[in-house]
Amino acid sequence: MRILVLADAMPYPLSHGQHLRIFHYVRTLGERHEFDLLCLDDRPLPQPVKEIFRRIETIPPTEPARSAKRGWRERFALEEMLPEDQRITDRLQQFLTEIDYDLIWMTGERVIPSVPFRRIPVLMDLVDDNVLTLLREAKSSVPLRRRLQALKRAFMHFQLERRYYGQGDGCLVVAEPDARMFSRICPWMPVRVVKNGVDPEYFAPREGESRDPVLVFEGNMSFPPNVDAVLFFARKVLPRIRQEVPEARFLVVGKDPAEEIRRLEGPEVEVTGFVDDLRPYIRQGAVFVSPLRKGAGIKNKVLQAWAMGRPVVGTRLSFGGLQVREGENALVADGPSELAASVVRLLRDPRKRAALGREGRQTVLSHYTWDQKGRELEAVMLEVAAKDEKRSAYA
């Protein structure tokens, strides 16, 4: 097949779930299919991206023009939230005129108004369902103002999914809860779950167990669910752990740490900011912790820790969509006391840490390599590309 990837950003560096997804699937499937890339970006083309795409064109991103004075109708209008960029539309039309593509793989909201529905089969990659994410945000214990903001944004994304994602020929998400939410929003639209993978050769274990009681969390530190998780763990869980293990430290790894996270820095908490290579930091941890309370989709951080043979303690939400076996490949706990108790148990039991690490890596090898998930995505792409007449019931 000839596949055009339409994305709202260059899929590199591999520090973002969407970038990981595009890069590794194109690399995995590139031996059997041809991929071109049209995306918003103004950076020089990275060599790894050049190597996996046949043709690449970029359009510099711009801030959309919005009305200076917006009434309530404009504030709830999709055209204001997501205006069409005519540059993308025109360039996309030129691509389709020059090349007879079998499929468009669309990922990223900023390019979605330009998608030529009904002209060519389109696979919409929602990844995580934002309506689900925002409804969880609205239900959480946050100030009323933020709850109302989350509900407003959830309504906007509900409209977005109905109007745009519902016009495609298939939709991808990474976890079953996201699929269930999308099916309620667009019941006429076929949705498939294709989970992310991990590179078990890159994220590989090394001999030697960390002897220091270091607890590691990794992620984009400006992403609200990660910010909430770090603040919750540092303020509510870590003090309980240090009552039992006074030398325990919390290592927070990831780019763009929010100011609230920066203020945590001290003898008990280290905040790294951006790092070129996550692996040395993950290896420092006696335990990898994932105290997420918000968000949707599956967590690449858990897959990476599992692949490296690290013992993982996390909330139920952290393992959503993953094949977790409580007590065998991870410890699952919710609430400050339960999380602290699970971490302390592991810090005191190196054999249990080793056993969890072995089973976590085996879970990755059995279910979550990019090659395995690539075959699942390929089947979905072939199915969607075969749709040359049927189109959405919603317009």
Image (tube, rainbow, N blue to C red):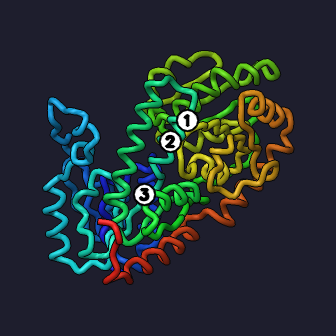
On the image, the x and y values in percent for residue 236 come to 67, 22
- In the displayed structure, does residue 183 sit left or right of residue 91? right
Q: Are marks 1 and 3 in contact (CB under 8 Å)?
A: no
User: Does label 2 or label 3 sit earlier along the sequence?
Assistant: 3
On the image, the x and y values in percent for residue 349 come to 86, 37
Q: Residues within 10 Å of mark 1 (few under 14, many from 20)?
A: few
User: Does label 1 or label 3 sit earlier along the sequence?
Assistant: 3
Residue under label 1: 139
Q: Are marks 1 and 2 in contact (CB under 8 Å)?
A: yes
Q: Are marks 2 and 3 in contact (CB under 8 Å)?
A: no
On the image, the x and y values in percent for residue 391 come to 33, 75
Residue closest to the eye, 234 or 148: 148
For residue 221, above or below residue 102: above
**CA gap, disc 1 and disc 3:** 22 Å
**CA gap, disc 1 and disc 2:** 6 Å
**Which residue is located at x 36 percent, y 61 percent?**
165
**The C terminus lies in quadrant:** bottom left
For residue 133, above or below residue 373: above
Q: Residue 322 appears in which quarter of the rendering? A: bottom right
**Which residue is located at x 81 percent, y 37 percent?**
346
Please tell me the numbered disc located at residue 135.
2
The amino acid on which the numbered mark 1 sits, given as a three-letter code, is Lys
Mark nearest the camera among 2 and 3 is 2
Which structural element holds mark 3? Answer: strand
On the image, the x and y values in percent for residue 129 come to 47, 52
The amino acid on which the numbered mark 2 sits, given as a three-letter code, is Leu
- In the displayed structure, does residue 97 sit left or right of residue 164? left
Residue under label 3: 126
